[in-house]
Amino acid sequence: MGTASYRIARGTAQGGHAGQLRAPMHRAQREDALFVGSLEKGLRVLNAFLTGEPDLGLSDICRLASLDKSAAQRFAHTLMVLGYLEKDPRTRRYRPSTRMLDWSVAYMRSDPLIQVAGPHLVELHEQTRQAVNLSRLVDTDVSYVVRIPARRARLLSPIVGERVPAFCTASGRAILSGRPDDEVAAILDRSDMLPFTERTICDRGEILARIAAARRVGYTIAEEECLPGELTIAAPILNAEGRSIGGVNMSMTTRDWTPKRMRIELAPALLRTVTILSSLQGYRPSSAVPA
Amino acid sequence: MGTASYRIARGTAQGGHAGQLRAPMHRAQREDALFVGSLEKGLRVLNAFLTGEPDLGLSDICRLASLDKSAAQRFAHTLMVLGYLEKDPRTRRYRPSTRMLDWSVAYMRSDPLIQVAGPHLVELHEQTRQAVNLSRLVDTDVSYVVRIPARRARLLSPIVGERVPAFCTASGRAILSGRPDDEVAAILDRSDMLPFTERTICDRGEILARIAAARRVGYTIAEEECLPGELTIAAPILNAEGRSIGGVNMSMTTRDWTPKRMRIELAPALLRTVTILSSLQGYRPSSAVPA
DNA sequence: GATAGTGTATTGTTATCCGATACTTCTTAT
DNA sequence: ATAAGAAGTATCGGATAACAATACACTATC
């Protein structure tokens, strides 16, 4: 009875995303003459692998992608022929192939924010010696697109593209603070607010209050909301219209830090960084966030 | 006339891959009853962004994906509705969205080699302080799936998933050294051997000789074949069948190193690492490579 | 203000994708 | 061992969903 049933950070971060695999909306797109359903189904098969399973059999794909056996067969086969899935001839199970990384390279190269932010993130890291991340909003999640690990942490960079729900992360709330109220409301509506830890804030009022506070001071802090022992401070990057296009965060442990010290020692450097990045996007402090 | 027309390393690594975008094979798959053409075309649209262009208009997509205007329109639209492409309403051009990173996370989590190799790569890095990479073969290219930058190099990790042709890289030739001759021949046949630098080895005989040498000593070195000033040493990881499933390489500059010193100071540690990794895959030295 | 180029919307036709079914192979329990 | 069941594979006629042609709208450029 000690640990209640909190969802596992890693599993469910993508698990929440798996909601995207919903079948029912079926013919909501019927109206859309340009929508190609076959492509959607094929991508649903690829998405079946987001759950983190190392490999899937045909029946697993049926279940996870909500397709009947024939469809799963055809799409999995096609993806295999094209080289995005590999099939173990022994087990007859499918697994993602290295070729899948092609997509992420395409994205990395095309995102102008990543290109321009890089050096400034490194500078922030060198000033503070803490882990620094650049994140962007994907639906109701935050996705880490650049990751600089802490100086004396493990050298293996955390996975780029990993997602965490926006509502309970500093980055997420920082980004939401740079969006109009109706958009924030829509995102929170879509989020399923399950707690990761006993400190995860799931109360909508409290979340909105913290977003409002972030609008005033320019940054926000989350304490052990996703991972026990983790403190995070984050601030939004704003574009010329005063709208957030991403966030910068720093993470550290409760062993070495307190929120108070973070406000004093880290917040100024963080704010300096996002101010520069925002101004590079054309943001001028006058531009107000439409609320 | 000083610099001849070498292809640019970055552009053409993926450019070679763009060969996959070939249109003509049109109905070679006609035979394959399970092949869903619509999915292939949709993925061709995604692949159009591999060229590195930050954004593409509809006509660019037509050209790069070899689709007519209607098809490009339908597939780009579908990908936009699904959230994989974003459209700038001003310019009406499409760009990859952050959601594309989902695929790479799926791959990263599912690849068992990456999971198990991580700590050993870190150890190799700490012993040698050099940049260490884990790579896998994708068609005729090598794709870097784990990257540990050199101690005092730029902190921003190089992009994971980036590709370089196998024929002219140490990693590539190391991996090929763990494949049977007919497979090597097939891969070299498919490669278009354009030089990156004046030292790129494009002579088939010479390439085969170096692969043969790698089979004997267990590693191979490439000198400035992809990038001027870059030296690379690499060795293959073998599975239980004695077949290579990936490669480990270390890169350094001609300023600080010579091939001779690499053989003396780095090769032993590299060989130790790949020996461990191979044995974890079930490889036992007795198992010979079928030639 | 004319022209070429690019993007959007619509439509009838038919090729393609569908999904039910029968067949084969592998698993597992008795 | 053997049989029962599950999982995966192969086939095929038919209807639907993808197709490609075309006409329209926009916007740059000269």
Image (spheres, coloured by chain):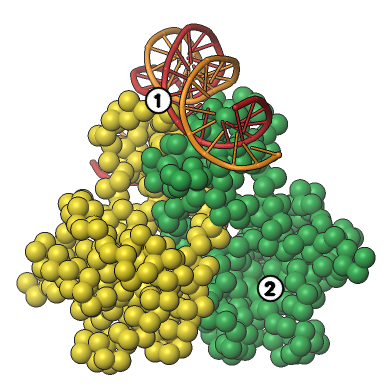
Chain colours: A yellow, B green, C red, D orange
**Residue occupying image coordinates x 49% and y 67%:** A114
The answer for which chain carries disc 2 is B
Question: Which quarter of the rendering shows the C terminus of chain B?
Answer: bottom right
Residue D25: give x, y in percent of width and height.
Answer: 46, 27
Res. B235 mark: 2
Residue B287 x, y percent position in the rendering = 67, 65
Q: Position of residue B111 (x, y in %)?
A: 48, 61
Residue in the foreground of this view, choosing between B164 and A263: A263
Q: Choose mark 1 or mark 2, whichever is in front.
A: 1
Q: Which is more toward the observer, B238 or A258?
A: A258
Tell me the distance, in whole angstroms, between the alpha carbons under discs 1 and 2.
53 Å
B51 to the left or right of A132:
right
Residue D9's x, y, as percent?
50, 32
Q: Which mark is residue A121?
A: none
Q: Secondary structure at mark 1?
A: loop
Q: Are marks 1 and 2 on the same chain?
A: no
Give the residue drawn at x 14%, y 65%.
A208
Left-right relation of A200 to C6: left
Residue labelled with disc 1: A33
Instruction: Give the chain letter at badge 1.
Output: A
Q: Residue at x 34, y 80 (%)?
A: A271
Q: Quadrant of the N terminus of chain B?
A: bottom right
* Residue density around tag 1, few if under 14, some if 14–19, many if 20 or more, within 10 Å: few
**In the rendered image, is residue A131 in sight?**
no
Residue B148 appears in the picture as rendered: yes
Q: Amino acid at mark 1?
A: Ala
In the picture shown, does residue B19 fall above or below B119? above
Question: Could you classify mark 2 by the number of other residues whose Cα lies within 10 Å: few (under 14), some (14-19), or many (20 or more)?
Answer: many
Secondary structure type for disc 2? strand
The residue that appears at 45% across and 36% down in the rendered structure is B77
Q: Which residue type carries mark 2?
A: Ala
Quarter of the view holding residue A180: bottom left
